[in-house]
């Protein structure tokens, strides 16, 4: 059964409602975004999550783009994150430093891929990237991260585009992650009506959604519930 992450929450009430669902991660955006929150806001939402679901710990993930260590220090003082999700050009050395600096905090490294319409060789029959090329890029991160996230490139923010990438490339990345023993999550343009197709066809370890469970730019609890139900119904 795939992991599910609901990202971009902004209020304690919604964080509490989501924590009562069978989700695995809740994400808070600290990078520049219309969903950006402060450390204090995230701390209040994490407290609401813990109160709403004391028997089951939903992991709190912070989304950052090329953060300075001082920024991470400041956030973690107010928001007890379980996961640091890094969406920039963070190097293996940087990820190693973060792992050593914050024992017990997981590190997920995001890698952005072109939007499906712009991807070279796009289409169901297109060949994914060579696994050896992926290994050349990703092997330096072994031992420095706890998971990888494939997202669609957004030229302004890095991720969070709300658009899909060419899913046919997933098997090549999944082959590397299986060999490395590192879970692979997929984001980018996921919605309640397409996440089942992704999971049925490609079987990633987890999925991450933000704009796909919104209505008029605000999180929609019914869409969140439907998305989670779809994910958890696929074994």
Image (cartoon, helix red, strand yellow):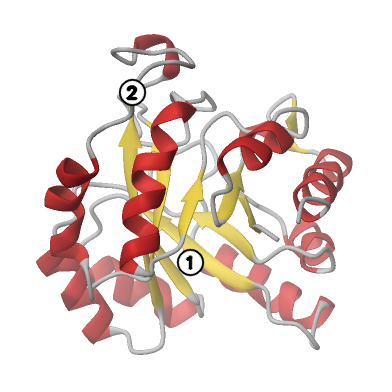
* Residue lying at 42% horizontally and 82% vertically, measured from the top left: 77
- The secondary structure type at the circle numbered 2 is loop
| Residue 98 pos. (x, y %) | 24, 75
In this figure, which residue is indicated by the disc labeled 2? 127
Q: Establish if 25 lies above or below 30.
A: below
Where, by quadrant of the figure, is residue 111 drawn?
A: top left
Viewer-proximal residue, 32 or 64?
Answer: 64
Q: Establish if 201 lies above or below 64.
A: above
Q: Tell me, for residue 179, which label it has, or none.
A: none
Where, by quadrant of the figure, is residue 21 drawn?
A: bottom right
Q: Earlier in the sequence, mark 2 or mark 1?
A: 1
| Residue 8 pos. (x, y %) | 59, 48
| Left or right position of 14 against 208 | right
Name of the residue lying farthest toward the right? 222
Q: Establish if 39 lies above or below 28.
A: below
Q: Residues within 10 Å of mark 1 (few under 14, many from 20)?
A: many
In this figure, which residue is indicated by the disc labeled 1? 39
* Residue lying at 15% horizontally and 41% vertically, measured from the top left: 133
* Residue lying at 26% horizontally and 47% vertically, measured from the top left: 88
Compute the Cα span from label 2 to label 1.
42 Å
């Amino acid at each position: 059964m795939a992991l599910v992450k609901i990202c971009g929450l902004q209020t304690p009430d919604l964080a509490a409602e989501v924590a009562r669902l069978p989700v695995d991660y809740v994400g808070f955006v600290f990078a520049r975004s219309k969903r950006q929150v402060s450390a204090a806001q995230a701390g209040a939402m994490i407290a609401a999550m813990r109160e709403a679901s004391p028997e089951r710990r939903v992991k709190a993930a912070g989304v950052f783009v090329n953060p300075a260590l001082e920024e991470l220090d400041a956030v973690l003082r107010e928001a007890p994150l379980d996961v640091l999700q890094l969406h920039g050009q963070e190097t293996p050395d940087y990820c190693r430093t973060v792992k050593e600096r914050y024992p017990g905090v997981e590190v997920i490294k995001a890698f952005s891929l072109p939007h499906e319409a712009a991807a070279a060789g796009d289409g169901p029959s297109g060949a994914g990237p060579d696994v050896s090329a992926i290994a050349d890029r990703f092997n330096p991160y072994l031992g420095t991260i706890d998971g990888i996230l494939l997202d669609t490139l957004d030229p302004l923010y890095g991720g969070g585009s709300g658009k899909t990438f060419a899913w046919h490339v997933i098997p090549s990345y999944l082959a590397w992650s299986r060999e490395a023993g590192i879970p692979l999550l997929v984001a980018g343009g996921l919605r309640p009506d397409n996440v089942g197709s992704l999971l049925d066809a490609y079987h990633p370890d987890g999925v991450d959604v933000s704009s796909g469970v919104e209505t008029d730019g605000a999180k929609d609890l019914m869409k969140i519930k439907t998305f989670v139900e779809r994910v958890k119904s696929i074994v």
